[in-house]
Image: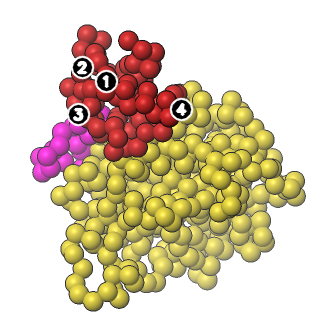
Amino acid sequence: MSSTPDRPFGTPMPPPPSPSGRAAVLCGLGSWLPPRVVTNEELSRRLDTSDAWIRTRTGISRRHIAEPGQATSDLAVEAGRRALRSAGTDDVDAVVVATTTPDRSCPATAPLVASRLGLRGAAAFDISAVCTGFVYGLASAASLITAGVATRVLLIGADTYSTIVDPHDRTNAIIFGDGAGAVVLRGGRADEPGAVGHFDLGSDGTGEELIMVAAGGSRQRSTPGEADPQDRYFAMRGKEVFRHAVTRMTASAQATLTMADCKVEDIDRLVPHQANLRILRSVAEDLGLPPERLVTNVESVGNTGAASIPLALADAATRHTVQPGERMLLTAFGGGLTWGSCLLTWPALSRIDTPHNTGGTQAS
Amino acid sequence: MSTTYDQLVEIVTKLHDAPQDRIGPDVTFAQLDVDSLTMVEISMRIERDLGVPIDDNELQEDLTLGATTELIDSKLAQ
């Protein structure tokens, strides 16, 4: 991990000592979206907003929402099953679930997901890094492999933001959607397709209040009196978050490039956390990357938190807009504040299912 | 008009689709229908291209392009 408190923000680190050549390699990919689709038109009927308003500000036209009673693990299991099928294996010895919306505050969601996938006895734990969860999860999963703790890891990013966003909050209800995306990692070499590496991770807890659910944790529970019902919902300070998201993702992506000793021209695809189309375009422009190299699916799924990067990868893979051997730069920003980036060489994957439940009501 | 004004107009028109004939020093961002997120993008671009730090609460929608130019110039003079 390159980001340390002593390092002034955005200062490139010297490249790490030459790695042994061992790396974690992505060998499976899957995703799943709950069938229920909420369009901008539907939101406009119950909130003071409009399709044009939402599109201009966010680039989002629809999102998928979990059914009543559906939990994050239900989405995670579906995505995980598809990733295992894509990898052609059910032999993984660790399951990592990145989520901000676990089924319960205790225990973690990953053990339940592992059991439901038949992965009996696998190590299983959650990662809590909000929208940076998938990149933090990749770093953790890759480390389990390179440290020799695990041979294959199933990493799932899954979130049901519809369970924490106030349905009457027109600023957040228009942005967030539910979904899950998953990858399988195995041990391999740093120079083969699928290899992940050159992680830059960082955080700044002084920005805790920019993105938060104020109530429900130990701070509120140890405080006498009832919590304000509004504090049980997700809150975000939009303008400040917009600014941080652009500057943090840009600087972190640049730090990863510096670490890998490569230039932005060497990058075939930028896959940022799908926060908002305008944030993504700003990051691409600030990096000096041509807009056509930006991978995005925020238009059809909204911001799906920890699921957004694997959902964007699966979307690009099923539409064949990414080719094996292409160099990808992944970058994310989220509550915490947290941020992170890494490189991924796109692998040849045998099978990637569409992220929809057949017979669902998704728009075409 | 000053170079600062021209640079500001260039930033605003690049980030926001406003008809050229409506742009002028006495026009406010609100009159150009600039939304709050675009205001953030404009202040970030001013910071990057003109080297002047602008807080989100300094650049308000009711500010005219002329007044914004003065704000930038006063910061440049500091």
The answer to whether A204 appears left or right of A170 in the picture is: right
- Secondary structure at badge 1 equals helix
Query: How far, Cα to Cα, is label 3 from label 4?
Result: 23 Å
Q: Position of residue B55 (x, y in %)?
A: 40, 43
Magenta stretch secondary structure, dominant: helix
> Bounds of the magenta span?
A35-57
Along the horizontal axis of the image, is A149 left or right of B45? Answer: right
How dense is the environment of label 4, judged by Cα within 10 Å: few (below 14), some, or many (20 and up)?
few
Q: Earlier in the sequence, mark 4 or mark 2?
A: 2
| A219 over A132 or under it: above or below | below
| Mark sitting earlier along the chain (4/1) | 4
C-alpha distance separating marks 1 and 3: 10 Å
Residue A329 visible in rendering? yes
Q: Quadrant of the N terminus of chain A?
A: bottom right
According to the rendering, which colour does chain B have? Answer: red
Real-space CA distance between mark 4 and mark 1, rounded to the nearest whole angstrom: 18 Å
Pick the residue in front: B25 or A253.
B25
Question: Mark 1: few, some, or many residues within 10 Å (few <14, many ≥20)?
Answer: many
Earlier residue among tags 1 and 2: 2
Q: Residue at x 39, y 59 (%)?
A: A210
Earlier residue among tags 3 and 4: 4
The amino acid beneath tag 2 is: Asp
In the figure, residue B11 lies in which quadrant? Answer: top left
Disc 2 versus disc 3: distance between alpha carbons? 11 Å
Write down the quadrant of residue A180 in the picture.
bottom left
Which is nearer the eye, B56 or B67? Answer: B67
- Mark 4 on the same chain as mark 1: yes
Q: Which mark is residue B62?
A: 3
Query: Mark 2 sits on what residue?
Result: B26
Kindly indicate which chain is depicted in yellow in the rendered structure: A
